[in-house]
Amino acid sequence: MLNILGAEVNYGGRVTDDKDVRLIKAILERFVNNKTTEVGFQFSGSGIYKTIPAGSKEDYINYIQTLPLNP
């Protein structure tokens, strides 16, 4: 549902190049899928950006503070 909303509905009228549409769909499929809800899913090859276990607000803040200032 989110992939369709992002690729087809939101960008559908604005993106006219078929290669750009394919790129948007590929990016969304990489970052919006069932695996992203699994703890430890890596959003980057380095493994720095990943999903963490559900926790308190402080747990999320602590994780965010471990991230590099410059991506």
Image: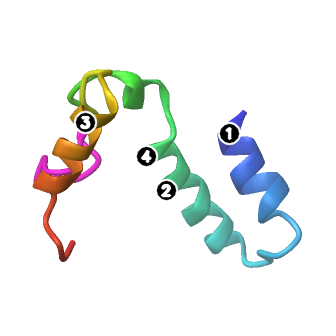
From the top left corner, tell me how far across and down residue 53 is, in percent: 25, 22
The secondary element bearing badge 1 is classed as: helix
The secondary element bearing badge 2 is classed as: helix
Which of the two discs, 1 and 4, labels the residue nearer the N terminus? 1
Badge 3 density bin: few <14, some 14–19, many ≥20, Cα 10 Å: few
The secondary element bearing badge 3 is classed as: helix
The disc at residue 30 is: 4
Which of the two discs, 4 and 3, labels the residue nearer the N terminus? 4
Which amino acid type corresponds to the residue marked 1 in the rendered image?
A: Leu
Instruction: Tell me which segment is drawn in magenta.
Output: 42-50
The quarter of the picture where residue 57 lies is: top left
Residue at x-position 68% and y-position 39% = 2
Pick the front one: 16 or 6: 6
Distance of label 2 from label 3 (alpha carbons):
30 Å
Distance of label 3 from label 1 (alpha carbons):
28 Å
Q: Where's the C terminus, which quadrant?
A: bottom left
Badge 4 density bin: few <14, some 14–19, many ≥20, Cα 10 Å: few
- Image position of 2 (left or right of 48): right
Distance of label 1 from label 4 (alpha carbons):
12 Å
Q: How is the image coloured?
A: rainbow
The disc at residue 58 is: 3
